[in-house]
Image (cartoon, rainbow, N blue to C red):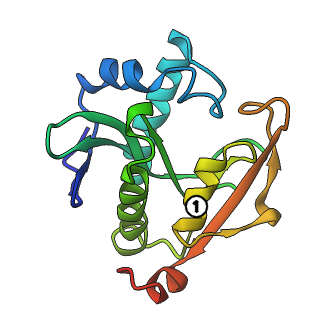
Amino acid sequence: MGDFRHETARLVLRDWREDDWAEFWRVTNTPSVMRWLGGVLDDAGKAASRVRLESYQRDHGHTFWVVERREDGALLGFCGLKRSNQPGGPQGMMEVGWRLREDAHGQGYAREAATASLDLAFTRFGADEVIALTVQGNAPSWGLMLRLGMERREDLDFASPDFDPENPVIIAYSIARETWKAAGHTA
């Protein structure tokens, strides 16, 4: 897709390659990983997801990039940036998001990748504010949003049964460039 590559202490965030897709679906399209993301995707869902990820890169210069572990090149999932586009939600705002394989949970990889993505949002892509979206039941996800310094934004919440039909509300968090800088990050 392109030449994007960004390294952190333990990770590489990079553009997608054709041979990434089978491994990505193998390690992330599982009941535990997809629990709060609408469930395991069928072939049509996987194809639509790929088209969306590729369109973000083409249309905006960023996407949810592949996350690789530097030490062994293992594909851990994705993390990165897109423009918020869910029906009923805040349209066009810069959004950070992540999805990592189950055996990568609880090791700080998501925080490391999301921190790098937020730095890039503010420094390379000119964002003034970045949001993150999840469902109330996904405590690990919104817990990371809090650890990243993001604040709850109930004014941006919206109804969507796509991810948690039992509680069909997408909840939002955000962080402004100035807040990110004040916390000692690059921006």
**Image coordinates for residue 74, horizontal then vertical, percent:** 22, 34
Which residue reaches farthest bottom? 182
Q: Quadrant of residue 91?
A: bottom right
Q: Quadrant of residue 122?
A: bottom left
Crowding near the residue tagged with mark 1, few <14, some 14–19, many ≥20 C-alpha atoms within 10 Å:
many
| Residue position marked by numbered label 1 in the rendering | 145
- Is 62 rendered above or below residue 124? above
Which residue reaches farthest left? 71
**Image coordinates for residue 169, horizontal then vertical, percent:** 82, 44
Q: Nearer the viewer, residue 187 or 85?
A: 187
Q: Quadrant of residue 142?
A: bottom right
**Image coordinates for residue 117, horizontal then vertical, percent:** 39, 60
Residue at figure coordinates x 54%, y 83% from the top left: 179
Residue at figure coordinates x 19%, y 48% from the top left: 3
Is 86 placed left or right of 119 in the picture?
A: right
Secondary structure of the residue carrying numbered label 1 = helix
Give the residue type that dot 1 points to: Met
Is 145 placed left or right of 181 in the picture?
A: right
State which quarter of the image contains the C terminus: bottom left
Q: Is residue 94 something that shows in the picture?
A: no
Is 56 placed left or right of 44 in the picture?
A: left
Residue at figure coordinates x 38%, y 80% from the top left: 185
Q: Nearer the viewer, residue 156 or 54?
A: 156
**Image coordinates for residue 165, horizontal then vertical, percent:** 82, 29
Q: Is residue 29 something that shows in the picture?
A: yes
- Is 13 rendered above or below residue 29? below
Residue at figure coordinates x 63%, y 22% from the top left: 39
State which quarter of the image contains the N terminus: top left
